[in-house]
Amino acid sequence: MRSITIAGREVSVIGLGAWQFGSTSWGWDREFGAREAKAIVERAVELGITFFDTAEVYAGGASERILGAALREHRDQAFVASKVWPTHPLRPQVLAAAVGSLARLQMERIDLYQVHWPNPLLPISWTMAGMRDLLDAGRIGAVGVSNFSLGQWRRAEAALGAVVPSNQVRYNLLQRAPERGLLPFAQEQGRVIIAYSPLAQGLLSGRYAPGHAPGGVRRLNRLFTPENLHRVRPVLDALGAVAKAHAATRAQIALAWVVAKPGVVAIPGAKSVEQVEQNAAAAGIELSTGETAALEEASRAFTPAGPLRSAWPMARRWLSLS
C-alpha cells in the first residue's frame, strides 16, 4: 500500500471511514460492530490500511466505540483520526469532547484530532486554545480541520501557532471544488487533503440508476435525484471504459483517480470485507495520462441539477443531533 506523510507519520493513501459503524442512517443497527466491523477493520490492517477516521457525532458515539474495540489488538499499526463537533467550540468543551472520544476509542492518544466544521458564530481561536492544550498534554498527536475554506484553514493555523497538517473535505470525480485553492495549497505547503465521500456516496460505483435511487442518508444528496442519475451516465461510462482496461470496478477507478493526486488520502467506507478489499486494491491501479484526461473531461461536462441543500439541517438529522 502506498503511503503519505501526515504530521510526521506515514499513513496509507487509502484509509477507512467509519461513519457507518453503528449508524442506523446507513441501514444498520447499534450492534453492527459486533458482527461486521471487527472483520472489516482486521482485514483492512492485513491489507496495509493504517488510516482510520471517525468522529464523536457518528452514530452518537457508537462509531468511535466500535472502531476502538476493533482496533484494540492493532493500535500500534493504526493512525486514528477523530473529530470534535462545532457545537463544542470553547476550550473546556473541546477538552471534555476529547476525553469522551478517548474513552470511547479506548485509547490514550488520538493521532489526528479535527475540528469537524467551522463554527459560523465564533472565532476559531477559541477552539484552537483547547486544541493547543491537548497537543501540549500529549493527548493528541496533531490538529486537523474539516470542511474549512482555505482562509479558514490559514486562520486556524495562525490561532494554533503550529502547522495544521490536514483538511478533510468532500472530494471526488463529481465534486472537485478542493482543486480551486485547497489542493494547490496542500501540495505547495506539504499539507494533506483527506477526501471523504471519494465515491460520491457510492454513486460512482454505478449501482444506482433512474428508478433505482437509494434511500437512507443518500436520499438527502441531490446527486441521487432522477435527473442527476441520468446526467451522471457519461461519467459512469468513462469510468466503465477505464475499469475494463484494468480489470477493475468503476469504484476502484474512481478511488485510483482521487489518490493519484499528490497530497491526497481517501477514506471510503466499507460495509463488508469484500468492499474493503476492493478499496485497498485501488491504491495499486496506475492510470495513464490519457485515462485521467478522459475521466476529467467527462467530469467537467457533468453539472448537477437542483439546489444544493444546506449541510446543517442534514447534519442535525443524520448525525443524531436533533
Image: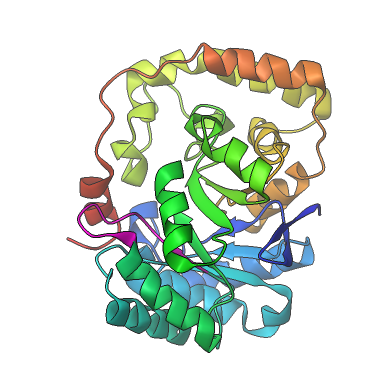
Q: Nearer the viewer, residue 316 or 228?
A: 316
Tell me the chief SS of the magenta region: loop
Quarter of the image for residue 316 reads bottom left
Q: Is 138 left or right of 97, judged from the image as shown?
A: right
Q: Residue at x 22, y 63 (%)?
A: 321
Q: How many marks?
A: 0
Look at the picture and state if 128 lies above or below 97. Answer: above
Q: Residue at x 52, y 34 (%)?
A: 181
Q: Residue 213, position in %: x, y? A: 37, 30
The residue range painted magenta reads 113-124
Look at the picture and state if 125 lies above or below 279. Answer: below
Q: Residue at x 64, y 68 (%)?
A: 41
Q: Residue at x 34, y 46 (%)?
A: 217
Q: Is 302 left or right of 92, judged from the image as shown?
A: right
Look at the picture and state if 245 lies above or below 301. Answer: below
Q: Residue 191, position in %: x, y? A: 63, 51
Can you say which quadrant of the picture contains the C terminus?
bottom left
Q: Residue 177, position in %: x, y? A: 48, 31
Q: Residue 23, position in %: x, y? A: 38, 62
Residue 231 is one of the magenta-drawn residues: no
Q: Nearer the viewer, residue 79 or 17?
A: 79
| Residue 139 makes an appearance in the image | no
Q: Nearer the viewer, residue 107 or 146?
A: 146
Residue 116 is one of the magenta-drawn residues: yes
Look at the picture and state if 181 lies above or below 129. Answer: above
Can you say which quadrant of the picture contains the N terminus?
bottom right
Quarter of the image for residue 112 reads bottom right
| Residue 54 makes an appearance in the image | yes
Q: Nearer the viewer, residue 41 or 168?
A: 168
